[in-house]
Image (tube, rainbow, N blue to C red):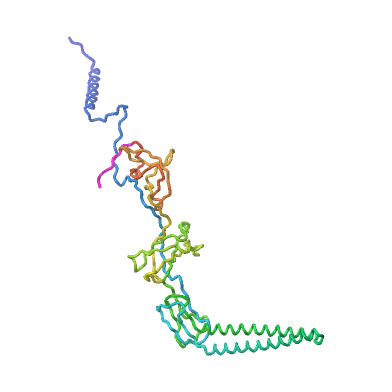
């Protein structure tokens, strides 16, 4: 009779045969193959075009957005310098005038009479002064020979001083009357346009009454408000670009002319005044403008999205794509642009380099990658 094996030894043999078969099946190519070092190769990651950035030089600029109303720089309110009746008003609202053109005339009969009276008073005072000086001269000669007392000499000297003061006072009054007569004719202070007129011929007006307004529209300014957060970046003579209501197809260039030293009360907004040349006469006071002030500009800047930056114990770096894998590339940073969304790289990368710009923390250096060619 043949030898009988125990039943449990038969079960073990079956299990061993199954394990051998599994190894043989795996060797047929369906399980991952380890590398020569015994470590499995990482899977290659495909990156979309929007997840990478190719570095190219670009011109960068930074601007502060502003808006405000236009108004003439040169504006003069013509007021009555004398009281009286208006004889002539030679201009109307909207009329162009030249410097020195006569705008308003007042009646001058009373003023001329007053001037004649004052001049007569001056002549009389001068005659009294001449007489007092002659009396003083005679008294001094008599006093030298002992025929005039000291009191008489002092009185003669006092009379001369009083007469001289009287001449000076009356001369000043005469000058005032002459100025009043001259001020009865009001002229344009500069080349401009009559913006308003509130007087008619024949009206009686008091001194200092507003009669009309003259504006020079060759130069205007826009008063804009800038937040205290941005005001430190502004300075005089910076370039501005404005779009004006009604002239949307035209960019109006200007410069920062003045910056207020304090913010408006109750706000954190600082008035800034932009000078605009109106050589073509297309701008009017009261127009509303929006635009920007150029605060910084550079050419041929190498800038990458801020999201491309990585930082660890070894310092700032980016992941550059080179030879089909991610490579850790240390970089040195320059200023930020576009409100911090872009950062200038001063060293570490060159034009034409491609870097990972999407925030994908699972991707690390030495991982193989490809870039999708799909649009």
> Where is residue 331 shown, x and y percent of the image?
41, 42
Q: Would residue 225 be found to the left or right of residue 41 on screen?
A: right
Residue 340: x and y in percent read 41, 51
Say above or below: 100 vs 85.
above
As drawn, is 85 to the left or to the right of 310?
right
Q: Say which quarter of the image contains residue 238.
A: bottom left
Eyeballing the image, is 99 above or below 358? below
Q: Which residue is drawn at 32% across and 29% down?
A: 39
Q: How would you classify the magenta stretch by its main secondary structure?
A: loop
Task: Please tell me in which quadrant of the rendered image residue 130 appears.
Answer: bottom right
- What is the total number of numbered labels drawn onto the structure image? 0
Residue 235: say if magenta: no
Q: Nearer the viewer, residue 237 or 345?
A: 237
The N terminus is located in which quarter?
top left
Residue 105 in picture, x, y percent from top left:
48, 85
In the current view of this chain or complex, which residue is farthest to the top? 1
Q: Which residue is drawn at 38% across and 39% down?
A: 329
Q: Which residue lies furthest to the left in this view?
A: 1
In front of the other: 257 or 224:
257
Residue 3 percent across, percent down from the top left: 20, 11
Location of residue 241 with respect to 33 vertically, above or below: below
Q: In the rendered view, tell whether residue 180 sits above or below residue 233.
A: below
Say left or right for 205 vs 338: right
* Extent of the magenta region: 367-375
Q: Residue at coordinates 24% horizontally, 21% vertically from top-left?
A: 16
Q: Is residue 205 left or right of residue 286?
A: right
- 132 or 280: nearer the viewer: 132
Q: Does the magenta stretch include residue 371?
A: yes
């Amino acid at each position: 009779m043949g030898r009988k094996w125990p039943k449990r030894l038969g079960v073990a043999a079956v299990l061993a045969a199954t394990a051998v078969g599994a190894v043989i099946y795996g060797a047929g190519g369906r399980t991952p193959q380890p590398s020569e070092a015994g470590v499995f190769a990482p899977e290659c990651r495909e990156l979309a075009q929007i997840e990478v950035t190719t570095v190219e030089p670009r011109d960068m600029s930074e601007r502060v957005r502003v808006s405000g109303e236009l108004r003439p720089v040169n504006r003069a309110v013509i007021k009555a310098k004398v009281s009286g009746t208006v004889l002539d008003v030679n201009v109307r609202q909207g009329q162009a005038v030249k410097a020195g053109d006569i705008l308003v005339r007042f009646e001058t009969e009373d003023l001329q009479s007053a001037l004649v009276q004052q001049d007569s008073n001056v002549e009389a005072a001068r005659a009294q002064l001449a007489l007092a000086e002659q009396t003083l001269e005679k008294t001094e000669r008599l006093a030298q020979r002992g025929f005039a007392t000291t009191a008489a000499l002092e009185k003669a000297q006092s009379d001369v001083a009083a007469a001289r003061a009287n001449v000076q006072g009356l001369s000043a009054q005469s000058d005032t009357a002459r100025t009043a007569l001259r001020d009865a004719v009001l002229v344009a202070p500069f080349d401009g346009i009559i913006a308003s007129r509130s007087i008619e011929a024949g009206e009686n007006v008091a001194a200092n009454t507003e009669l009309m307004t003259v504006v020079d529209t060759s130069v205007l300014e826009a008063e804009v408000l800038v937040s205290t957060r941005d005001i430190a970046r502004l300075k005089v003579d910076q370039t501005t670009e404005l779009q004006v209501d009604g002239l949307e197809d035209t960019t109006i260039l200007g410069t920062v002319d003045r910056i207020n030293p304090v913010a408006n009360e109750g706000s954190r907004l600082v008035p800034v005044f932009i000078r605009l040349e109106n050589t073509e006469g297309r701008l009017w006071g009261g127009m509303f403008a929006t635009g920007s002030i150029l605060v910084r500009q550079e050419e041929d800047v190498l800038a990458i999205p801020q999201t491309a930056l990585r930082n660890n114990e070894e310092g700032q770096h980016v992941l550059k794509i080179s030879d089909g894998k991610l490579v850790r590339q240390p970089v040195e940073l320059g200023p930020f642009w576009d409100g911090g969304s872009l950062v200038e790289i001063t060293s570490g990368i060159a034009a034409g380099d491609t870097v990972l710009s999407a925030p994908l923390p699972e991707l690390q250096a030495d991982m193989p990658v490809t870039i999708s060619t799909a649009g």
